[in-house]
Image (spheres, coloured by chain):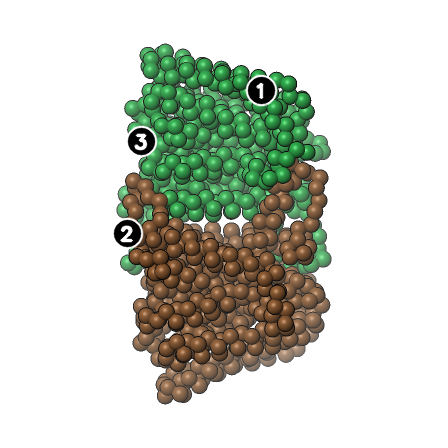
Amino acid sequence: MNYRLVSKYLGHFLLATALLMLPSVAWAGYFQEWAALAAFLKSIALTVVFGLVLWFLGRNAPNQMYQREALALVAFGWFAIALVGAMPYMLADVLGPVDAYFESMSGFTTTGSSVLTDIESVHKSILFWRSFTHWLGGMGIIVLFVAVLPYLGVGGKQLFKSESSGPDPRGLSPRIKDTAAILYRLYVALTALQTLLLMLAGMSFYDALCHTFGTLASGGYSTRNLSIAAYDSVAIEVIIIFFMVLAGTNFGLFYAMLKGDYREAFQNTEWRVYMLILIGVTLVITANLLGMQGHIPGVPDPETPHYTPGSALRQASFQVVSLMSTTGFCSDNYELWPHLSRMLLVSVMIVGGCAGSTSGGLKVIRVIMLLKIAGRRMELLFRPKRIRAIQIDGQAVDEEVVRGVCGFFILYGMVLISASLYMSAIGLPFESAFTSVVTTMNGVGPGLQFVGAVENFAFIPDSGKIVLCLCMLLGRLELFTLAVMIIPSFWKHS
Amino acid sequence: MNIRLLARQLGRFTLAFSLLPLPGAFCALCFLEWSMLGGFLAAMAIAAAIGLLLAFAGRHARGHIFRGEGVALLGLGWLVATAAAALPYLFAGQLGLVDALFEAASNLTASGFTVLAQGDTLPLSLVFWRAFACWAGGFAAILVFAVVLPHFGAGGRPHFSAGGGSSDPHALGPRLRDTARVLGSIYAGLTFSEIVLLRLAGMPFFDAACHALGTLSTAGIRNATGLVPSYGSLQIELVLVAFMAISGSSFALYRSVLQGHWSAMLKNSEWRLYAAVLAGATLLAAANLLGIQGETPRTPGEAPVAASFGHALRLAAFQVAAVVSGSNFCTGDYDAWPQFSRMLFLVLIIVGPCSCTAGGGFKLFRVILLFKITRRRLELTFRPKTIRAIRIDEEVVDTDTQKNLFGFCILYGIALVSAGILLSACGLPFESATTAAIAALSNAGAGLQLLGPLDTAAFLNAPAKLVLALCMILGRLELYCIFILAVPSFWKRA
């Protein structure tokens, strides 16, 4: 491990991060929040100092980057940016150190789990920073899936098609820098578009911008205590649903569509399954909200409020899209919904959006592959001699990718179980312990029960918050990037 | 698929199975329960008639049993056996059709779920039949795991029986007979010793017999209170703990021990892990019972369950041994224990005991393999070129076994999520639905909350009972053999 090189790049990275705090400074000036302004300036100064120190430590590093250094840089980079991102919360006296780190990590990993009990009492410029961390995190994810994941063998190659071998169907440039630049432009364009639409629907520029950041990064931080429910506007909900669906879609497909290749986009298996799940689950939950639900004598049902067919469809579609795209905005308290709806919402959280998007979760493409692998194993029982590769979109999936996906699934289960066990040890009941881990690992935001739609994570003890921070980062970095660090030989000199 | 051959073999199997209620009938004779005697005889007659009918339908069958037919025979045979085992309950007039099927499925899979709220008011011969069906089912499960599934290449532990997965259609019979003789005598011998020891410890003979049958099969027998009638005797609890621990460690190992290889046990990494899990979980649960448990503002801590270390150890040791082996015995209501214990027990239920036992769940062999595979995948991310085989106890685990394990994990996930969704659609809350599905898939017999260790399943509605019954059978046949019956191409002519 070439520590000095990692240190040098981390230094560069932090110096760049300092610049990213400047927009918040402007907002603090605009809203005349002098305490927040001071906090941001101090944070910038500290970040610059950290950056310079790290850069100085690594100034003479041998300039040879191997896989280990890249992995370490990604993981440390994420830890470090969450650390400096936490400083404004602390210096403005909004949150204590662990809470601030949790809030910051939740922002950068585009999770959206919050420890703020009264959001509206916080400085508006701090809230802008909070939403802006989502947007920056979304940018980071794009770099991750274009530049890093394809080389890790966690099914990454298959996850972003433009990096696959052979003739490139979408015409995206295989060169990392170009690909990233195209995707960034798309990301910025979508941001501008959604902000504009939200303003037309009646939001202020500030609210529109913050909610756009939360939507496109599939984050979920709102500037209101009641999240989207505070606006109670169908137009706003429809716009946000639309952009949440986009945020959960493979960004490579947008590029195909921009080029006019609609068939390519609509024939993409992953996207079709994604839409199918969204629509199917929405319809089932709508029916469920209208009272279609099995009943067991003696088992109390939640006190679900009355819904008309229209309102049921409206709330069901918003919640399903929000949780499956792992955004985590809420327009209704689904904690009061019937048992089936709650179970389905947790299930779609685990599935998550498409690969190559800013959403988290297992990802639809992995779920499809897992189902095909299981089918293949069963077929081998009665047709032992038939050997055929698993195919997706007419392309054979490489054996190594299949193993990568299986390994991912297994590690996912292990992390889920061990983190849930820890959360129960600090006193959380089953439902809260399990769903707090599910929601953070998948980058969603809210879970069930004590961490449900209208709750927050403030009551969780510090050690639990740290474990959840790790879960967020593990999920965000597709598990493997971070989990390699527990292997001792990773740290050895090669 | 050779349907005629399938019918003939299924008929022969049903004919043989129709003899199973004979001990129940004998018991009814001893206790002078004439109506029950009639019930048992009628059940035997109907099963025999169905068997003859099936055999008649397939009398012109030709050809050999290939893998496809073998797998179908196993899956269908288990379903037919379940139906036949439900007949005595139906004729006893105590249970409706769904309840009888549920109870029979639970018995034959040695799960320990029950719908019989008041075991004490049942005819004694029926109580005995319940225990005996568990015992027979438990033994069948050992054979299926040790011989049949590896023969099909469907999970199990292939290198237990010499030769491994073979597609030779003629090899199964002799090997099955040979293994059945050896393991059968160990199984029966252990049962007999436990009856004697329980009797010596002061349990009445009938109870001792039923409890011994329930222990070795890892089913667990519940009486009216749901608690083990230990009559306050430490000896009885100790005997049960010892035999639960014995029934959870590999019967294949006992064979080696009987052949004089005393060190086989200590050298076996699965068994060592088993011992470590038992000891570790007991200590953790005991500490938890003494009040070592985190608390949060939302979940205030409760008074410790146990007053002294000895008491805590006694409760914890019994419950851990019961839960790991999947025996549904209790000396305390662990659903009311602190959150950590509840979650820990749930994890132990998923993990299960050693392979080649009547216990359910993943089995420790698979857990070891999963950890090794994950570690290997992690190493591959930063050392892409290292190729080393995965070994357990010096034996190389071939890629086919690994792939089967992947398939198992995926099918487990599919079964768990679908069962959870179906159960919540039936009206069960999140916690009960999830844990009941886990307990059924692991053949453990009790989950948390509404289906906790002291609860019966009697309050459930019919669809929920059928879902749970199916899950038990799925888990018992290591998922593959039931799932495959739903694959359309499985039934096509080869």
Res A346 seen here: no
Tags 1 and 3 both on a single chain = yes
Q: Position of residue B222 (x, y in %)?
A: 37, 69
Element at label 1: helix
In this view of the protein, which residue sits in the foreground, A29 or A415? A415
Q: Is residue A246 left or right of residue B254?
A: left
Q: Is A69 drawn above or below residue A433 in the view shown? A: above
User: Hey, what amino acid is under mark 2?
Assistant: Ala
Cβ–Cβ under 8 Å for marks 1 and 3? no
The label shown at residue A57 is 1
Q: Residue at x 30, y 25 (%)?
A: A120
Q: Chain of mark 3?
A: A
Give the chain coloured green. Answer: A
Q: Marks 1 and 3: which is nearer the front?
A: 1
Chain letter, disc 2 residue:
B
- Which of the numbered marks, if any, corresponds to residue B303? 2
Residue under label 3: A117
Image location of residue B96, percent across then percent down: 37, 71
Look at 41% across and 79% down and name the residue there. B200
Observer-side mark, 3 or 2, equals 2
Alpha carbon distance from label 1 to label 3: 40 Å
| Residue at position x 55%, y 80% in the image | B15
Q: Amino acid at mark 3?
A: Thr
Q: Eyeballing the image, is A405 above or below A115?
A: below
- Quadrant for the C terminus of chain A, please: top right
Which residue is drawn at the image coordinates 60% and 53% (left, top)? B369
Looking at the image, residue A187 sits to the left or right of residue B468; the answer is right
Please state the horizontal and vertical placement of residue B286, each as a whole percent of the image: 38, 55
**Chain B image colour:** brown
- How crowded is the residue under tag 1: few (<14 C-alpha within 10 Å), some, or many (20+)? some
